Amino acid sequence: YEPEQQPQPLSGIGRIFLQCDPNKPVSLEELKQLGVLHWKLDADIYESDPVLQKIREEWHYTYNDIISIHKDTLPNYEEKLKMFFEEHLHLDDEIRYILDGRAYFDIRDKEDKWIRISMNKGAMITLPAGIYHRFTMDETNYTKAMRLFKGEPVWKAYNRPADDFEVREKYLNSTKSA
Ligand code: KMT
Ligand code: NI
Protein backbone atom coordinates (compact mmCIF):
# COMPACT_ATOMS: atom_id res chain seq x y z
CA TYR A 1 0.00 0.00 0.00
CA GLU A 2 1.48 3.30 -1.09
CA PRO A 3 -0.77 6.01 0.39
CA GLU A 4 0.86 9.00 -1.34
CA GLN A 5 0.33 7.40 -4.72
CA GLN A 6 -3.28 6.41 -4.12
CA PRO A 7 -6.17 8.52 -5.34
CA GLN A 8 -8.45 9.45 -2.49
CA PRO A 9 -11.54 7.26 -2.51
CA LEU A 10 -15.08 8.34 -1.80
CA SER A 11 -17.50 6.15 0.09
CA GLY A 12 -21.17 5.20 0.15
CA ILE A 13 -23.16 2.07 0.85
CA GLY A 14 -23.54 -0.28 -2.08
CA ARG A 15 -22.17 2.21 -4.52
CA ILE A 16 -19.16 2.03 -6.70
CA PHE A 17 -17.01 5.13 -6.85
CA LEU A 18 -14.38 5.61 -9.42
CA GLN A 19 -11.40 7.84 -9.41
CA CYS A 20 -8.24 8.01 -11.32
CA ASP A 21 -5.01 9.65 -10.35
CA PRO A 22 -4.94 12.56 -9.54
CA ASN A 23 -8.51 12.40 -8.25
CA LYS A 24 -10.18 12.89 -11.59
CA PRO A 25 -13.67 11.37 -11.53
CA VAL A 26 -14.21 8.52 -13.99
CA SER A 27 -17.52 7.97 -15.76
CA LEU A 28 -19.44 4.71 -15.79
CA GLU A 29 -19.24 4.96 -19.58
CA GLU A 30 -15.45 4.66 -19.35
CA LEU A 31 -15.84 1.62 -17.15
CA LYS A 32 -18.12 0.07 -19.74
CA GLN A 33 -15.59 0.70 -22.49
CA LEU A 34 -13.00 -1.14 -20.42
CA GLY A 35 -15.33 -4.15 -20.34
CA VAL A 36 -16.14 -3.95 -16.64
CA LEU A 37 -19.64 -4.97 -15.52
CA HIS A 38 -21.14 -3.79 -12.25
CA TRP A 39 -24.29 -4.11 -10.21
CA LYS A 40 -25.65 -2.74 -6.96
CA LEU A 41 -27.42 -5.38 -4.89
CA ASP A 42 -28.95 -5.87 -1.45
CA ALA A 43 -26.21 -7.80 0.35
CA ASP A 44 -28.46 -8.46 3.37
CA ILE A 45 -30.51 -10.92 1.32
CA TYR A 46 -27.76 -12.44 -0.82
CA GLU A 47 -28.74 -15.99 0.15
CA SER A 48 -32.19 -15.65 -1.43
CA ASP A 49 -31.83 -12.63 -3.69
CA PRO A 50 -33.75 -13.14 -6.96
CA VAL A 51 -31.80 -10.30 -8.60
CA LEU A 52 -28.48 -12.05 -7.87
CA GLN A 53 -30.03 -15.30 -9.08
CA LYS A 54 -30.98 -13.69 -12.36
CA ILE A 55 -27.50 -12.26 -12.91
CA ARG A 56 -25.95 -15.64 -12.17
CA GLU A 57 -28.22 -17.34 -14.69
CA GLU A 58 -27.76 -14.71 -17.37
CA TRP A 59 -23.95 -14.71 -17.14
CA HIS A 60 -23.53 -18.39 -16.24
CA TYR A 61 -21.89 -17.66 -12.89
CA THR A 62 -22.47 -21.20 -11.69
CA TYR A 63 -19.81 -21.37 -9.00
CA ASN A 64 -19.65 -19.33 -5.81
CA ASP A 65 -17.85 -19.27 -2.48
CA ILE A 66 -17.30 -16.70 0.24
CA ILE A 67 -13.98 -15.29 1.34
CA SER A 68 -13.58 -13.31 4.54
CA ILE A 69 -10.52 -11.12 4.31
CA HIS A 70 -9.28 -10.21 7.76
CA LYS A 71 -6.09 -11.03 9.60
CA ASP A 72 -7.98 -13.37 11.98
CA THR A 73 -9.98 -15.22 9.34
CA LEU A 74 -7.76 -15.54 6.29
CA PRO A 75 -4.77 -17.87 6.56
CA ASN A 76 -1.52 -16.16 5.43
CA TYR A 77 -3.33 -12.82 5.40
CA GLU A 78 -0.29 -10.59 4.87
CA GLU A 79 1.13 -12.78 2.15
CA LYS A 80 -2.18 -13.02 0.30
CA LEU A 81 -2.79 -9.27 0.43
CA LYS A 82 0.65 -8.74 -0.98
CA MET A 83 -0.21 -11.08 -3.86
CA PHE A 84 -3.57 -9.41 -4.48
CA PHE A 85 -1.85 -6.02 -4.67
CA GLU A 86 0.63 -7.15 -7.31
CA GLU A 87 -0.60 -6.02 -10.71
CA HIS A 88 -1.89 -9.11 -12.51
CA LEU A 89 -4.38 -10.61 -14.94
CA HIS A 90 -6.40 -13.82 -15.14
CA LEU A 91 -7.39 -16.02 -18.07
CA ASP A 92 -11.02 -15.79 -16.92
CA ASP A 93 -13.34 -13.06 -15.65
CA GLU A 94 -12.88 -12.05 -12.01
CA ILE A 95 -16.32 -11.70 -10.43
CA ARG A 96 -16.67 -10.34 -6.89
CA TYR A 97 -19.64 -9.34 -4.77
CA ILE A 98 -18.95 -7.40 -1.55
CA LEU A 99 -21.19 -8.80 1.20
CA ASP A 100 -19.67 -6.79 4.03
CA GLY A 101 -16.88 -4.33 4.65
CA ARG A 102 -15.06 -2.49 1.91
CA ALA A 103 -12.30 -2.94 -0.61
CA TYR A 104 -10.67 -1.40 -3.65
CA PHE A 105 -10.05 -2.76 -7.08
CA ASP A 106 -7.60 -0.81 -9.20
CA ILE A 107 -7.79 -1.34 -12.95
CA ARG A 108 -5.72 0.04 -15.81
CA ASP A 109 -7.42 2.39 -18.25
CA LYS A 110 -6.65 2.64 -21.97
CA GLU A 111 -3.71 4.96 -21.26
CA ASP A 112 -2.39 2.47 -18.72
CA LYS A 113 -3.28 4.75 -15.79
CA TRP A 114 -4.90 3.40 -12.65
CA ILE A 115 -8.59 3.77 -11.98
CA ARG A 116 -9.52 3.09 -8.37
CA ILE A 117 -12.87 1.36 -7.85
CA SER A 118 -14.13 1.73 -4.32
CA MET A 119 -16.42 -1.17 -3.46
CA ASN A 120 -18.81 -1.13 -0.52
CA LYS A 121 -21.31 -3.63 0.80
CA GLY A 122 -23.70 -4.48 -2.03
CA ALA A 123 -21.33 -3.75 -4.90
CA MET A 124 -20.73 -6.49 -7.44
CA ILE A 125 -18.24 -6.33 -10.25
CA THR A 126 -16.87 -8.36 -13.14
CA LEU A 127 -13.37 -7.61 -14.35
CA PRO A 128 -12.89 -9.05 -17.83
CA ALA A 129 -10.30 -11.73 -18.52
CA GLY A 130 -7.03 -10.12 -19.59
CA ILE A 131 -7.45 -6.77 -17.82
CA TYR A 132 -4.55 -5.71 -15.59
CA HIS A 133 -5.73 -5.04 -12.05
CA ARG A 134 -4.93 -5.31 -8.35
CA PHE A 135 -6.88 -5.52 -5.12
CA THR A 136 -6.42 -3.84 -1.76
CA MET A 137 -8.18 -3.04 1.51
CA ASP A 138 -8.89 0.28 3.18
CA GLU A 139 -8.05 1.27 6.77
CA THR A 140 -10.84 -0.96 8.17
CA ASN A 141 -8.92 -4.01 6.92
CA TYR A 142 -12.02 -6.10 6.55
CA THR A 143 -14.08 -7.35 3.68
CA LYS A 144 -16.31 -10.32 3.05
CA ALA A 145 -16.80 -11.14 -0.59
CA MET A 146 -18.54 -13.71 -2.72
CA ARG A 147 -16.32 -15.06 -5.47
CA LEU A 148 -18.22 -16.22 -8.52
CA PHE A 149 -17.03 -18.10 -11.55
CA LYS A 150 -18.25 -19.59 -14.81
CA GLY A 151 -17.74 -23.32 -14.25
CA GLU A 152 -14.86 -24.79 -12.25
CA PRO A 153 -12.93 -21.95 -10.59
CA VAL A 154 -9.37 -21.11 -11.57
CA TRP A 155 -7.82 -18.43 -9.36
CA LYS A 156 -4.39 -18.38 -10.95
CA ALA A 157 -2.99 -14.87 -11.37
CA TYR A 158 -0.27 -13.89 -13.84
CA ASN A 159 1.71 -10.90 -12.71
CA ARG A 160 2.52 -8.16 -15.15
CA PRO A 161 4.15 -8.44 -17.65
CA ALA A 162 1.75 -11.05 -19.02
CA ASP A 163 1.25 -9.61 -22.49
CA ASP A 164 1.84 -12.79 -24.46
CA PHE A 165 -1.39 -14.48 -23.44
CA GLU A 166 -4.02 -14.70 -26.14
CA VAL A 167 -6.57 -13.46 -23.60
CA ARG A 168 -4.59 -10.24 -23.23
CA GLU A 169 -4.61 -9.57 -26.96
CA LYS A 170 -8.31 -10.40 -27.10
CA TYR A 171 -9.01 -8.04 -24.24
CA LEU A 172 -7.09 -5.18 -25.86
CA ASN A 173 -8.94 -5.71 -29.13
CA SER A 174 -12.29 -5.65 -27.33
CA THR A 175 -11.51 -2.24 -25.82
CA LYS A 176 -10.50 -0.82 -29.18
CA SER A 177 -13.86 -1.52 -30.79
CA ALA A 178 -15.82 -0.37 -27.73
C1 KMT B 1 -7.75 -11.08 -7.27
O1 KMT B 1 -7.42 -11.98 -8.03
O2 KMT B 1 -7.48 -9.90 -7.55
C2 KMT B 1 -8.49 -11.40 -6.06
O3 KMT B 1 -8.81 -12.52 -5.86
C3 KMT B 1 -8.82 -10.31 -5.13
C4 KMT B 1 -9.25 -10.73 -3.77
S1 KMT B 1 -10.85 -11.52 -3.66
C5 KMT B 1 -11.97 -10.33 -2.98
NI1 NI C 1 -7.30 -10.71 -9.77
Image: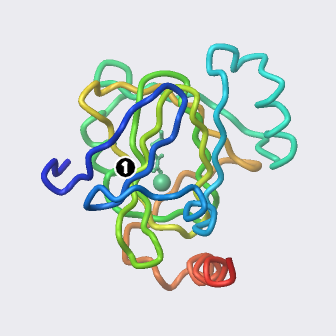
On the image, the x and y values in percent for residue 71 come to: 28, 24
Up/down of 17 relative to 109, above or below: above
The scheme the figure's colours follow is rainbow
**Residue at the image position 63 percent from the left and 46 percent from the top:** 38
Q: Is residue 148 rendered to the left or right of residue 116?
A: right
Specify the quadrant of the image occupied by residue 103.
top left
Q: Secondary structure at mark 1?
A: helix
Position of residue 133 relative to residue 109, above or below, is above
Give the residue at mark 1. 84
State the residue at coordinates (37%, 49%). Answer: 84
Q: Position of residue 135 (x, y in %)?
A: 39, 48
Which residue is at the front of the view, 14 or 167? 14
Q: Is mark 1 within 8 Å of ligand 1?
A: yes
Position of residue 130 relative to residue 155, above or below, is below
Q: Position of residue 51 (x, y in %)?
A: 80, 29
What is the residue that sits farthest to the left in this orientation?
A: 4
